[in-house]
Structure formats: structure tokens, C-alpha cells
Amino acid sequence: MSVPTVEDVVSEPAPGASEEAQLKATETVTKPWWHNWQKSEIIALDCENVSVPFRPKLGKRKWCNTVTATITTCDYDGKTKSYMVYHEPGTFLTNNPVTGFKSNTFINGRPIEEVRKQLEAYLHGKLVILHGAAGDFDALGLNAGDFDYFDLQSFWRTHKAGAMNETETESISLRSVYHHYYKVDIQAGHHDAAT
């Protein structure tokens, strides 16, 4: 994330300054950090993933790996770009009723290396808005530290009672955030990275 510059900070009037200078100084408003980007430099990104059954040669200990299937970016003006990653039919689980992916859904997709390279170039120098950034960057094989990004999941949190009745917070799902603002359950039917 970018660090606010001196111009972003509220100024204080100099000692003995005129009343007009004092008024001007108190009217100065802190510039939010996201104003360091032009509207054309703000991009939202979401990924939908598929589960690939465990393959011992991958060295993973989980019964399946989660890999990227579709990616959508949306700019400030609402223009979207969608990417589909190639997955051979029968190499991923298709029993997820939310995504609606079928065994032949990705036969027209592109290799992940190609999609990754294109996304990396597109996102460079932009502010990327995500929900669950670590999972999306990881699934794409990108290093989150190479990008300026804001993770909505780090901002929206929900409270729950801890083991000793103390209040703890935990991340809130995109489904819950979306439902809060739009009163629609995005997982009530099929959805993809664009919806």
C-alpha cells in the first residue's frame, strides 16, 4: 500500500497566523490514500477456483488443490475483462452447485502461465481491490507484495464469542458483504467471477 505523502496530511496554522490562515488550515481535509490513483488505475479482481484431486507428484498433503479457473477484472467505469484457464475435462471436481462448472467448461481456456503473465502486466501500477486477496494471488501464482492492493476482507470483519467469552473478530465472506449491501445471496444460484 502507498504511504500518505506530506500533502495528504492536515496542516496546522503557524503560531500567530491570521484568522484567515487559521480557518484555511482547519478546513484542509485529509486526502484518503486511494486518491493516490487515478480512477483509470483502480481495478477490482475476483477469481473462481476449481478443486483438483490430490496428485502425489505435486507434493501436497491435502486431498485436493484449489486452482484458478476463471478471473474477472472490473475497472472504475464498470468495464470487465474475463479470463478462463484451460483445464482438461475430468481433471477437476464438478460437484460445486454454486459455480456450475461442468467437465468441459474450460476446454477453450488458456494456459495459466499465459493468463498469469497478461494479468501481471495489466495489474502493474494499479490499485487492485480484492476480497480474500491472499487466496486469489496464491491461486494465480502471483506474489501479493508485487502489487498495490486493498483487501476488503481485511476491512470488513464480524464479531464472534471466543473460547473464554471474549469478543474475537474473523474475516467476513464476500457473500455476506454482498448480501448486506444488495440484499441478494450471490450463492443462491450459479455465479462466476464477474457476478
Image (cartoon, helix red, strand yellow):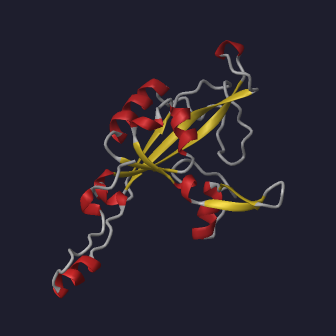
Q: Residue at x 50, y 41 (%)?
A: 71
Residue 16 seen from this side:
yes
Q: Where is residue 126 in the image (x, y as percent from the top left)?
A: 34, 46
State the residue in front, 34 or 112: 34
> Quick one: which residue is furthest to the right in this view?
164
Q: Is residue 21 left or right of residue 109?
A: left
Q: Indicate whether 90 appears above or below 10.
A: above
Q: Indicate whether 129 appears above or below 48.
A: below
State the residue in front, 159 or 108: 159
Residue 186 seen from this side:
no
Q: Which residue is drawn at 50% across and 29% down?
A: 141
Q: Where is residue 50 in the image (x, y as percent from the top left)?
A: 64, 35
Q: Where is residue 85 in the image (x, y as percent from the top left)?
A: 51, 31
Q: In this view, does 5 lie to the left or right of 129?
A: left
Q: Where is residue 33 in the image (x, y as percent from the top left)?
A: 36, 58
State the residue in front, 53 or 154: 154
Q: In this view, does 95 lie to the left or right of 109?
A: right
Residue 37 lies in quadrant:
bottom left
Q: In this view, does 75 lie to the left or right of 17?
A: right
Q: Which residue is drawn at 66% across and 24% down?
A: 91
Q: Indicate whether 63 appears above or below 17.
A: above
